Amino acid sequence: MRLLFVGDVFGDPGRRAVEERLRDLRTELRVDFCVVNGENAADGSGLTPRLAERLLAAGADVVTLGNHAWRKRELLPYLNGAERVIRPANYALDAPGRALAVAPADDGTPVAVINLMGLLFLDVPVGPFALVDELVEEARRQADVVVVDFHAEATSEKVALARWLDGRVTAVIGTHTHVQTADARVQPGGTAAISDAGMTGPHDSVIGVEAELAIRRMRTGLPVRFRPAEGDVRIEGVVVECSTDGRATSCEPVRVPVP
């Protein structure tokens, strides 16, 4: 089985890239199942129900979120009924939505997807290590193939969680920093991992934002309204190949320009 994870979709440029290229990319890469992190698809911060449905219609089997999950208030009631759009388990324990989704791959094989958020430098009430074992056990009762989207700032925390879960899940994919890392690997226990899958959106930017606006705020310290940039749009992510028992056999980064 081949799994495609698409890194953080940023603003309209990232969403358009997914809508224009994901279906063909699934065919080109022989992908059986696709996870898309969509937490920045709405103007670079948050997700709306309408955009969530568009990502699913474009070829995502499951959409994950992150620290901007609550930026668009209309998403909250939507999450209560959504089965394939999930939010981090430890972002807010009693918040709407779920942190685990199970959906069929193209051949009918169930795939479980877990969403978690890091503790270091992010505001969460409970650390990921306090919840992850229970979540993995629940996922493994429903599927042999288990993918974890770990939305976190610190590379050390991402590497640590991947090591902790080695041999128990198929892949631990880092998101949040919007910068694809060079450490895609399969660990000794058969769990694929990468510290960050990267960003799907405009790379002629400061992590998706028009560079001049980001620099102005950094130089002055004054509030600046950010806008998504437009140039050098590409899809970034990772392809994981695994056997039917969920053990990963390869993990390769993906970087596809979208003119």
Image: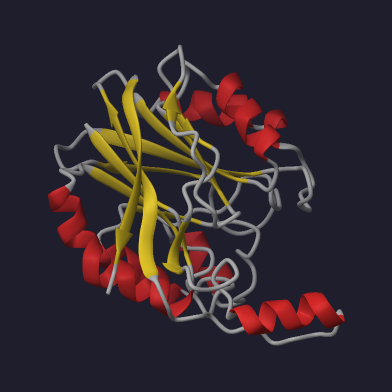
- Of 49 and 8, the residue lying toward us: 8
Point out the image quarter for the C terminus: bottom left
Tell me which residue sits at (86%, 79%) in the image: 221
Vertical arrangement, residue 101 with respect to residue 156, above or below: below
Point out the image quarter for the N terminus: top left
Q: In the image, is 107 to the left or to the right of 44?
A: left
User: How is this picture coloured?
Assistant: secondary structure
Q: In the image, is 181 to the left or to the right of 124?
A: left
Tell me which residue sits at (49%, 73%) in the image: 204
Q: In the image, is 198 to the left or to the right of 73?
A: left
Quarter where residue 192 is shown = top left
- Of 84 and 51, the residue lying toward us: 51
Tell me which residue sits at (53%, 68%) in the image: 40
Percent x, y of residue 199: 47, 59
How many marks can you see?
0
Percent x, y of residue 132: 61, 30
Quarter where residue 31 is shown = top left
Quarter where residue 162 is shown = top right
Vertical arrangement, residue 117 with respect to residue 183, above or below: below
Percent x, y of residue 234: 36, 65
Q: In the image, is 118 to the left or to the right of 120?
A: left
Vertical arrangement, residue 75 with respect to residue 32, above or below: below
In this view, the residue farthest toward the right is 221
Percent x, y of residue 30: 15, 43
- Of 43 and 88, the residue lying toward us: 43
